[in-house]
Image (cartoon, rainbow, N blue to C red):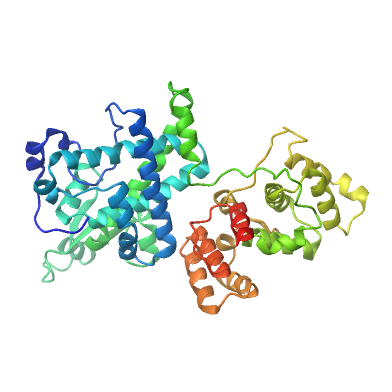
Amino acid sequence: MLKQKGRISVQVLKKADKRLEEYPTTLNFYHLPPTDQVTLFEFETYSLDRLRVLKQVENARIRCKTDEEMIKFIEPCLQQYMDLKRNTRLQSVGAEVLYNERRKDHISHFILRLAYCRTEDLRSWLLRQETLLFKLRFMQEQQQDRHEFTEMNNLNIEQVSMDDIVRMLYPQYASWDGTPNLLFYKTPFHQVPELVAKRQVLLHRGNAFVAEQERIVLVVNAFKQHLDEQLEITAKAVPGLDEQDRLVPILDSLSKQFVSRDYTPNQNGTVTHESIPELSKHFSPCMKHLYDALQRDAHLKHMGRLQFGLFLKGIGLTLEEAMIFWRKSFNRMTDEEFQKKGYSYGVRYNYGMEGKRTNYTPYSCVKIISTMPGPQEAHGCPFRHFSAENLSSFLMSMRIKESDCQEIVQKAQDHHYQIACTRLFEVMHETSVDAIDHPNQWFDLSIQK
């Protein structure tokens, strides 16, 4: 998708192929689902190709520091699996190629909506990757095509000239001799919190005036909000899907390809309560923090016990071994207190032996990040819930070099919590890995190294 000079109008596209009226640019807000007939082969290959691209987008978050580096990083993958040639290539490749590429992009997006709408973790993962992919594509599109795309999708972004802003702020001035072509976009301030935080907008009476070069933030936020809403709607519609026998197994398989998987206990009995201290060097940061707190205080509050207990269940600690581990860990109370306060019940509950008798699975990163620990609680995500100073001290205690520590803390402060965690793993193990999205994934990868 190299930048090229010149521009092809929508009228020329329609003349070349009427079907391109549906796809006038490489950009798509995915308002309407595709109405084409799709073979099962297309259904599977299109969705898998898009998943490969989204996985590469996720990896770009870890490897790259700037948007330009991300574009360069994902370019080979895009060209191989989800190429979208711009309108300037019409004469060289033909209208049929442009249409087929954009049709594949359209169909594959909606397939993944179906596959990734059913749980909070899946929706969150898809929303992050699709939003970043849209942003990178928007950056590469020609300026006039970006403008027309914005107009076609009725984003209600009001243009305001510099002259209008000066008159609004300083009504006593009759004229403005500054740059007349400087444009701003008016929007409620809560639509652009990242720009407000960086003081990159003009605020006036509840509105933010966004400079032309920052317009991408408005469009990307609108895309993210739209997709978030549509994923919720799709989640409610999927249970009534008619194609239960043919499509649901494919959708189930797709949802397990690249994101958090459920971790079930290892049944070979190799993990015992006595082996946990040695295995603790392979614990993810959140679990290491819980384990250290348990060793220090001989106690964890309810959410900490739940988060850590399910993690231990996931690495293969059986119910019998778990009962011994927790009883020995709570060594400042008697057996009677341990039973009376319900700690024994809680362990059995995690293993589906009490209450609703549900076979609970370990918490994913998304679920852990979304929790909010209170005073004297140790659960949660260190990258999300620690202050910069506490996180830095925590990393230094793990013997992380100061330069790496600063990089990781910065990623956490930029709200890239899983990326920060993945980067820590790479620093500690001197290797490169795909994005980590589950504490048990960290454990599995660490124990293999």
Q: Nearer the viewer, residue 30 or 284?
A: 284
Q: Residue furthest bottom?
A: 402
Residue drawn where x is 68% and y is 64% of the image: 281
Tell me: 73 left or right of 313.
left
Tell me: 85 left or right of 352.
left
* Residue 359 % position (x, y): 69, 37
Q: Is residue 226 visible?
A: yes
Residue drawn where x is 42% and y is 34% of the image: 114
* Residue 42 % position (x, y): 33, 33
For residue 51, which quarter of the picture?
A: top left
Q: Is residue 117 visible?
A: no
Tell me: 316 left or right of 419.
right
Q: Where, quadrant-wise, is the C terminus in this rendering?
A: bottom right
Q: Where, quadrant-wise, is the N terminus in this rendering?
A: bottom left
Q: Nearer the viewer, residue 422 or 304?
A: 422
Height in image: 25 above or below 331? above
